[in-house]
Image: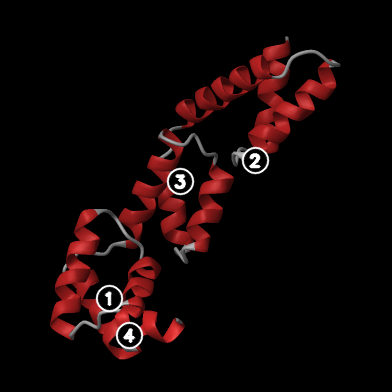
């Protein structure tokens, strides 16, 4: 069964792979690792993969900083992720520290705190009864799992309590 699936995969020539990779990158922002994985999936050899990536970078189809900024902004605005989770996900994609730092600048501090407050208020409504410190602990755990910083979480919880 495995051999059958291996034979089914279509192999691309170098020229076909460049065109297909350009289309892949034009569709949405990609990081180098995603493109590298896709090129290997298409059956290309390491030398070809690296030269295609170099061409994509020189033709501005691939830009790590642009990807990191789009990723961070999108995950914060749409999925309401905190900085910690976003940084971890960018690191997982082998994005440089410089690009991660630039991406974090995309997150407006006021919007970040406002989102944190909204998430806490929403979760507060979900968790009913029990002792206040236990409810706060449950809320803090949930918000921390979204990637927000513990000190900020407790600061906002204390602020909302007063």
Mark sitting earlier along the chain (3/1): 1
Distance from the alpha carbon under mark 3 to that under mark 2: 18 Å
Pick whichever, 102 or 53, lies toward us: 53
Residue 116, image quadrant: top right
Are dots 4 and 2 in contact, CB under 8 Å?
no
- Determine whether, in the image, residue 76 is placed left or right of residue 135: left
> Colour scheme used in the picture?
secondary structure
Distance from the alpha carbon under mark 4 to that under mark 2: 42 Å
Distance from the alpha carbon under mark 3 to that under mark 4: 44 Å
Mark 1 or 4: in front is 4
Residue 51, image quadrant: bottom left
The residue wearing badge 3 is: 104
Residue 108 in the image, given as x and y percentages of width and height: 43, 33
Residue at 55% over, 20% down: 118
Q: Is residue 158 above or below residue 99?
A: above
Point out which mark residue 7 bears. Answer: 4
The residue wearing badge 1 is: 53
Give the SS element for disc 4: helix
- Determine whether, in the image, residue 57 is placed left or right of residue 103: left
Are dots 1 and 2 in contact, CB under 8 Å?
no
Mark sitting earlier along the chain (3/4): 4
Pick whichever, 135 or 59, lies toward us: 135
Distance from the alpha carbon under mark 3 to that under mark 1: 25 Å
Mark sitting earlier along the chain (3/2): 3
Residue 4 in the image, given as x and y percentages of width and height: 38, 83
Are dots 1 and 4 in contact, CB under 8 Å?
no
Residue 83 in the image, given as x and y percentages of width and height: 54, 43
Give the SS element for disc 1: helix
Residue 60 in the image, given as x and y percentages of width and height: 19, 64
Distance from the alpha carbon under mark 1 to that under mark 4: 26 Å
The residue wearing badge 2 is: 145
Mark sitting earlier along the chain (4/2): 4
């Amino acid at each position: 069964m495995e051999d059958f699936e291996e034979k089914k995969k279509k192999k691309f020539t170098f020229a076909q792979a460049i065109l297909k990779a350009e289309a892949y990158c034009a569709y949405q922002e990609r990081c180098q690792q995603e493109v590298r994985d896709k090129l290997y999936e298409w059956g290309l050899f390491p030398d070809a993969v690296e030269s295609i990536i170099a061409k994509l970078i020189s033709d501005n189809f691939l830009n790590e900083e642009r990807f990191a900024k789009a990723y961070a902004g999108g995950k914060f605005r749409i999925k309401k992720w905190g900085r910690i989770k976003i940084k971890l996900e960018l690191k997982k994609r082998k994005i440089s520290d410089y690009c991660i730092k630039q991406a974090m600048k995309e997150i407006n501090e006021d919007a970040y705190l406002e989102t944190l407050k909204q998430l806490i208020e929403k979760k507060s409504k979900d968790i009913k009864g029990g002792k206040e410190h236990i409810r706060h602990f449950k809320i803090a755990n949930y918000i921390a799992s979204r990637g927000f910083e513990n000190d900020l979480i407790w600061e906002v919880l204390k602020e909302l309590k007063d």
